[in-house]
Image (cartoon, helix red, strand yellow):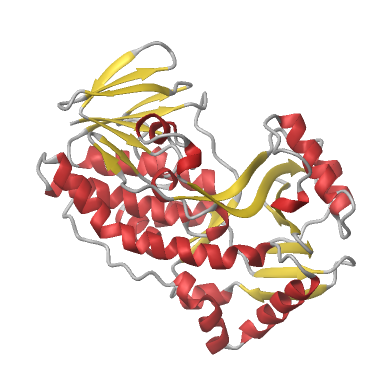
Amino acid sequence: MKIAISGAGVAGPALAFWLHRVGHEPTLIEHAPRFRSGGYVIDFWGVGYDVADRMGLIGPIHSAGYDVKEVRLVNARGNRTGGFSVDIFRHLTRGRYTSLARGDLAKVIYDCVRDKVEALFGDTVASIKDTGSDVVVGLASGASRRFDLIVGADGLHSEVRRLVWGEHRLFERALGYHVAAFEVTGYPHRDPDVYVSYAEPGLSISRFAMRDDRSLFLLVFADERLVGPAPHDDAGRRAALRSVFGRCGWETPEILRALDRAQEVYFDQVSQIEVPDWSRGRAVLVGDAAACPSLLAGEGTGLALTEAYVLAGELQRAAGDVGQAFRGYEDRLRGFVAGKQKSARQFASSFAPRTAFGIWLRNVATKLMVIPPIADRLLGDSVKDDFVLPDYKF
């Protein structure tokens, strides 16, 4: 089949990999003018790690990643007040764990299909007409193409989902926080392989030293900290961050000055996506477009890889019966993904506790994680995946 895939992040190229392997003709459609690597750093483990292993990509993924040693929570003077060794995660995942920039993971996957599948960069799906036997996809560039299926792998604000299912607000569950991220070179404070985080009630600001003298910053704040409507332009986002964090201690004044040098700033509401069905007619959703667990969940990329693998496998198993394939895909994964979303809702507040007592309690809890049974109780459910990958004999 000829299959259009909107989005060239993690889910889209992963799906293209498996579809191409069994003889389909995927076409990636990506609004960015070129493939983008980098981005915020994620932890990568679990069932998504197993999918990457089946793709033969664990070596390149670890080469692109970082051997993070510690999560360090600090006070306004920079003194350690909590945190834990990342060896806890390595123990819980039996060593099948690494940290890397989300875009670098996507690039490792995309490099496997770069010369094998068609990719349309700098274009966007603008219209979708399902004829029953195929889909006519209109592109923002003015072109029109026919495909057997269209896949929305275009993230939290999926355009495919909007065109087929309805407006974003119908399916978006806000978790009460906003998040921002940016990267600069030459920031003077660097703690290699340590994720350093500072919190005040309702907000947190964190940094991580990357290769080539780059530093990544992640800022999280409760919605009530934002005065007025959420900004929709770059200047407004930077102004909002200066307003929210302007009176914070620790290195925050230096970090806000570094914000001036950032080429781009990621800024969004922390949300989940819940749609009543993952497919309609000849359209289907994967990754964050189908069931975003939220950026703070820690396993969104792994779930995206898993969904791509299962969707491709069910299409192969159904031998052309698209409805059967889509039902099998959702039946296998929906309960598992819903459990991950529930866990993320419970965990999100730990990034920016809303009270001084909440910050103190979180810091104490992280110190206690040196005791293995406590670490397992606090993190075990979020790290362990209760899902067995099907063997589709690709």
**Residue 181 visible here:** yes
Please report the residue visible at 54 percent of the width from the left and 35 percent of the height from the top: 36
Camera-side residue: 330 or 91? 330
Q: Is residue 240 above or below residue 137?
A: below
In this rendered view, identify the residue nearer to me: 17 or 243: 243
Q: Can residue 56 be seen at all in this image of the molecule?
A: no
Does residue 254 lie above or below 380 as drawn? above
Count of residue discs: 0
Q: Residue at x 42, y 43 (%)?
A: 289
Check the picture and name the quadrant holding the N terminus: top left
Q: Locate residue 246 relative to residue 53 in the image: left or right.
A: right
Q: Is residue 191 left or right of residue 172?
A: right
Decide if residue 388 is on the left or right side of residue 194.
left
List x then y, in percent, for residue 43: 53, 60
x, y percent for residue 34:
51, 27
Which quadrant holds residue 153? Answer: top left
* Residue 222 image point, x, y percent: 71, 55
Image coordinates for residue 388, horizontal then vertical, percent: 27, 67
Q: In the visual, does 278 lie left or right of 354?
A: left
Quarter of the rendering containing residue 315? top left
Which residue is at a point 65% across and 40% down the rendered structure image?
266
Q: Is residue 40 above or below residue 261?
A: below
Instruction: Tell which residue pokes out farthest to the front in this image.
Output: 170
* Residue extending furthest toward the top: 142
